[in-house]
Amino acid sequence: MQIVIVGAGPTGAALALLLVQRGIAVTLIEAAKDFHRVFRGEGLMPSGLDALEQMGLSALLEHIPHRQLNAWEFILGEKQLFRVEEPMGSKRPCTLVSQPPLLKALISQAQTNDGFEFIQGVPIKDLCWSNQRVTGVVLSDGQKLSANLTIGADGRNSVVRQRAKLELVRQPKDIDILWFKLAASPKFAADNVFRTILHGDRVFSVFHGVEEGKLHLAWVMSANEKTDSKQADWGEILASHSPSWLAEHFRNYANTIESPIRLSVVVGCCPHWHAPGVMLLGDAAHPMSPVRAQGINVALRDAIVAANHLVPLLQASAEHQQIDMALAQIQAEREPEIIRAQKLQLAEAAQGEQLRKNPLLRSLLAQLAPLLRKQIRRSWLKRQHEMRQGITKVQLTV
């Protein structure tokens, strides 16, 4: 049995490792020449940390750059609305991890197994078909690779999805974000809090990333955004929407603010993740919102469920029809968690948008915050549990 996996992100790299460790030949294809991207999600929730532990990979984190979050805080105007300490009832706190070294480590482990091939820097051009079944891929250099099963784990702009003509149903509104890096404040280094700040009709989040001495900042763009992101005085803009201690930092370190990158985040889900001979997983099947860092976590859980269903069939050299039936079972098992997580993400984003658009509501909430803080905090905590722990049970059984 020969498996081709397109995309060496968290889904593709983790699934490739699980398969080759169990004696299944895998060719992993990555279009990019390296693993560095403008943006890669860093947040491992308890569900993602549990997935790595089940794969026997917890020790990897000790050898790659990582940083724990200490708390989550919401600031309205200049006043704290509420703060919640990690690990919020979980065994482990949310941990930020640098994806490039994580992916390199997963692939290095896969390369210690026979039957693993890694092709990097060569994108796929098309799929191969025979009798209405996908039988492999065509690379941009003209090379054709045959496969009993092709897995598209090539992200939210998946070429595999496009070539297989699998529809992506997008949420009505994409999320546009300006992504910044700048010098970190010692306050963040000592107490790494993910702060979301709503000031007037502006909202942004800031935290200390994995990279030493660097703050990450996500500025949510409004529909009528008029700021010239390249020419704006971001030090002053950010300061004018921040509590005094953070405003001082933005002004003092304005010269370290890197030119922002605009991210247009597509969110949605495919009604069908598979066709004969081909399966989509991760962002290729269900691109996630950045709200509460779900992407990497559901990706790792996708890999575990796919391995559970596929390994016994591939080890037994099952008929193609049996493999195709398993693809439907993988979607059926994973889809409820994805749909629920995206609904929770959408609800949280909608709540923030309602506050952003309604000055009267913001004013009332700011005035009543001392009285309502415990109730607001409790409501937020309740919503986070599923997104942190996972919504369905995922257990590696092969």
Image: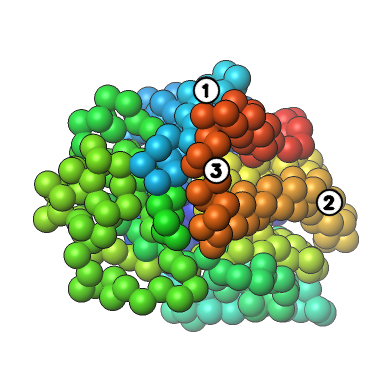
Q: Is residue 309 visible?
A: yes
Q: Is residue 216 visible?
A: no
Q: Which residue is mark 3?
A: 365
Q: How far apart are the alpha carbons under marks 1 and 2?
A: 31 Å
Q: Which color scheme is applied?
A: rainbow
Q: How far apart are the alpha carbons under marks 3 and 2?
A: 41 Å
Foreground residue, 77 or 164? 77
Q: Disc 1 on helix, strand or loop?
A: loop
Q: Which residue is mark 2?
A: 332
Q: Residue at x 23, y 37 (%)?
A: 245
> Is 284 on the left or on the right of 336, as rendered?
left
Question: In the rendered view of the protein, which quadrant contains the C terminus?
Answer: top right
> Is 327 situated above or below 60?
below
Q: Which residue is mark 1?
A: 87
Q: Earlier in the sequence, mark 1 or mark 3?
A: 1
Q: Residue flagged by tag 3: what amino acid is it?
A: Leu
Foreground residue, 311 or 43? 43
